[in-house]
Image: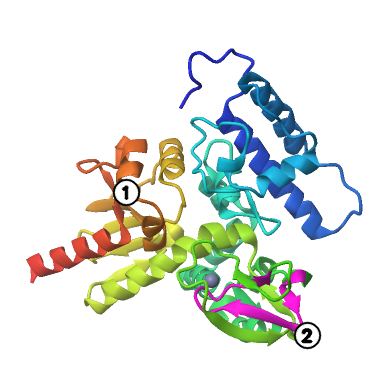
């Protein structure tokens, strides 16, 4: 994706500006969440994004944000409402970087310059530590138990967390599990309780009026359903944001697929060989899958162009599988993804399909072989 050739060289690339803005917002959210300092400078990326947006605005002869504060207020509105056009920036008009004052999953996806945020995830210190510890102990089951916990329980009370850690498989990585679940932010509690979502088991957050509660997870399949309510005094813990975006969201599809495939009587492994892939199906001539929960197919295509799924040599077939929530939320998701990344078109070594298409392909093979 390049700028229109008519743009002068001093006009910044909107894609890069948005990436800087997104990573500045993530940095700022981290600083304010730590509350370690009362007055901190804004992250350099925010200031840089402001300067570059100003240049874009000049070029488009439209208004620019007057300050970082105003820039942050833009971040909370859909891109369609911005006075500045963002051609080739791989964002949809209804998307925004902040929702209810918090970074969105879109912000998280954009926050990595080369779209290689999942690569960074693998380098994430916490995930790395879990990987090292479980590999050193030759305990793949511990690695799987850790991943499964993060997918199934984005919220835990302090007591539930202790109970889970009594399981020897998780006990091996107890320190890392505790780091993955910091205390829920104080604004999650109202009237002395913390509410959860029945759809995704995540937190419900109160809107400004303190009476409306909303599921924070924009890929939740049933955001209107109420889940358990916990007294705030029980010490509610909430999985870290980047883990919710890149582990929990695709993990829901991973667990669903594993269940359906196991019900067909087919061998299936989750995160085999310490995460060589997300799913391996069939014991003989296995099919492997990398499961994705990116909101935007063009952004996912860009990420795949930067870093393609490395297929284990013994795999018979390899798929990039997109979760049903994401496929349903975007028209022609798979078609747009294949257009953005020709390397996942039919006939290639790795083929992009929806969750439903993947399960159907497995079913066809089972029928053919029986
Ligand atoms: Zn939910």
At x 65%, y 63%, the residue is 240
Please state which of residues 92 and 254 is positioned toward the viewer in this rendering. 92
Q: Would you say 63 lies left or right of 19 here?
A: right
Q: Which residues are magenta?
A: 187-206
At x 56%, y 31%, the residue is 85
Residue carrying label 2: 233
At x 74%, y 28%, the residue is 51
Q: Quadrant of residue 114?
A: top right
Q: Would you say 38 lies left or right of 155 here?
A: right
Query: Could you say which disc has been placed on residue 332 in the image?
Result: 1
- Residue 77 visible at all: yes
Give the farthest residue toward the right: 38
Q: Quadrant of residue 307?
A: top left
x, y (%) of residue 17?
Answer: 63, 32
At x 39%, y 66%, the residue is 254
**Which element carries disc 1, helix, strand or loop?**
loop
x, y (%) of residue 211?
Answer: 69, 76
In the picture shown, does residue 262 fall above or below 250? below
From the viewer's perspective, is the residue at label 2 or at label 1 nearer? 1
Query: Could you say which disc has been placed on residue 165 in the image?
Result: none
x, y (%) of residue 109?
Answer: 55, 47
x, y (%) of residue 216?
Answer: 60, 65
- Residue 314 visible at all: no
Q: Would you say 25 lies left or right of 11 here?
A: right
Please state which of residues 306 and 104 is positioned toward the viewer in this rendering. 104
């Amino acid at each position: 994706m390049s700028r229109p050739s008519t743009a002068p060289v001093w006009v910044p690339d909107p894609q890069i500006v948005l990436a800087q803005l997104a990573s500045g917002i993530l940095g700022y959210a981290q600083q304010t969440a730590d509350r370690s300092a009362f007055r901190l400078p804004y992250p350099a990326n925010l200031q840089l994004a402001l300067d570059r947006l100003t240049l874009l605005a000049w070029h488009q002869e439209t208004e620019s944000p007057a300050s970082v504060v105003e820039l942050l207020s833009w971040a909370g509105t859909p891109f369609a409402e911005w006075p500045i056009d963002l051609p080739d920036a791989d964002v949809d008009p209804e998307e925004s970087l902040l929702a209810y004052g918090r970074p969105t999953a879109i912000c998280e996806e954009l926050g990595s310059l080369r779209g290689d945020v999942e690569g960074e995830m693998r380098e994430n210190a916490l995930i790395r530590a879990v990987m090292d510890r479980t590999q050193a102990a030759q305990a793949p089951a511990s690695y799987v138990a850790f991943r499964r916990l993060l997918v199934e329980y984005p919220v835990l009370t302090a007591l539930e967390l202790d109970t889970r850690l009594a399981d020897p498989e998780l006990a091996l990585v107890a320190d890392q599990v505790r780091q993955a679940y910091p205390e829920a932010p104080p604004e999650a509690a109202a009237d002395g309780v913390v509410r959860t979502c029945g759809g995704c088991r995540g937190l419900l957050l109160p809107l400004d009026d303190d009476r409306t509660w909303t599921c924070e997870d924009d890929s939740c399949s049933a955001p209107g359903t109420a889940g358990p309510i916990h007294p705030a005094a029980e010490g509610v813990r909430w999985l870290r944001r980047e883990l919710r975006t890149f582990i929990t969201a695709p993990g829901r599809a991973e667990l669903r697929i594993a269940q359906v495939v196991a019900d067909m009587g087919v061998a299936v492994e989750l995160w085999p060989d310490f995460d060589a892939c997300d799913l391996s199906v069939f014991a003989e001539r296995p099919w492997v899958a990398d499961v994705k929960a990116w909101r935007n197919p063009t952004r996912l295509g860009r990420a795949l162009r930067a870093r393609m799924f490395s297929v284990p040599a013994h795999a018979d077939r390899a798929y990039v599988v997109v979760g049903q929530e994401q496929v349903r939320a975007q028209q022609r998701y798979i078609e747009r993804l294949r257009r953005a990344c020709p390397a996942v078109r039919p006939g290639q070594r790795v083929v992009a399909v929806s969750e439903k298409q993947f399960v159907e392909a497995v079913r066809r093979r089972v029928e053919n072989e029986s």
